Image (cartoon, rainbow, N blue to C red):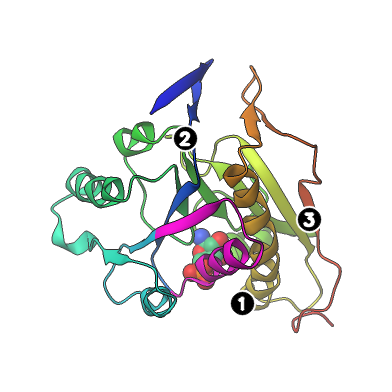
Amino acid sequence: MLFISCGRFTLAALSPGRRRLVILISGRGSNMQALVQACRQEDWPADVSAVIASRPDAPGLQWAREAGIPTASVHHRDYAGREAFDTALAQEIDRHRPDYIILAGFMRVLTPGFVNRYTGRLVNIHPSLLPAFPGLHTHGQALATGVQVHGCTVHFVTPLLDHGPIIAQACVPVLPGDTPEILAERVLGMEHRVFPAAVRWLAEDRVSLTADHRVQVQGDPVRLYMWSGGDTAAR
Ligand code: GRF
């Protein structure tokens, strides 16, 4: 595979043909399901080549198996440290020759070596409007700080945790009476819309980076998704 260098960030020049996507999960995998369903229903020029979990009991694995997708798990507890885990994970990923590796609720911090191996091909969804609230407990952080708007971000992964060029975002209001759980549910509904949209642009080879490390999408689609009510958590 060739790479096009663009300042300190590099975007992959992909091989011809259908894009191969490998999705990494740690838990229930609702984002993974949204991606698989959109890929199939909307007939993307892409296939989900494998779903790999960081634990063998991740509930999302069974759904993927039933959907006919090859699955694997690389259990972080089987490895002495992050480096060893990331090496084993990379070996499993590379078996599937992916163009893009999609982190869909993958709850492990990745080493710089792993991230750099997949520069420009590693994409994450984070449940906040980055750069606000990197890390864990984002919904609680949003409530604690009193922000009135919250959401999620699809971004390229760089070695700095929960940073990297932003591909798309979705926002929701913070409503009176919200708990972290209610807010998480509202954000998740938007994750299931914005993540498939962004990954589809990747599958269609429409995403590039400017010299100052911002994302451009051919055709200039709307890259901010707005909540318009209707979830069970809204009052
Ligand atoms: C999502 O909110 C995702 O943004 C975060 O973890 C959650 C995973 O949910 N990183 P699911 O496994 O996709 O249902």
What residue is disc 2 on? Answer: 158
Q: Residue at the spot x=23%, y=63% of the render?
A: 75
| Ligand 1 is within 8 Å of the C-beta of the residue at disc 3 | no
Magenta residue span? 28-49
What residue would you read off at disc 3? 225
Contact check, label 1 and label 2, Cβ < 8 Å: no
Q: Is residue 39 magenta?
A: yes
Q: CA distance from mark 1 to mark 2?
A: 28 Å
Q: Earlier in the sequence, mark 1 or mark 2?
A: 2
Q: Say which label, 3 or 1, has the lower sequence index.
A: 1
Depth check, front residue: 228 or 22: 22
Q: Amino acid at mark 1?
A: Glu
Residues 107 and 12: in front is: 12
Camera sees residue 166: yes
* Residue at mark 1: 181
Residue 134 rendering spot, x and y as whole percentages: 55, 48
Rounded to the nearest angstrom, the CA distance separating label 3 from label 1 is: 21 Å
- Residue 87 position in % (x across, y down): 21, 44
Q: Residue visible at 55% across and 36% down?
A: 164
| Viewer-side label of 3, 1 | 3
Q: Nearer the viewer, residue 1 or 90?
A: 1
State the CA–CA distance, disc 2 to disc 3.
23 Å
Q: Could you tell me which secondary element the residue under label 2 belongs to?
A: loop
Front-lying residue, 99 or 86? 99
Dot 1 surroundings within 10 Å: few (below 14), some, or many (20 or more)?
A: few
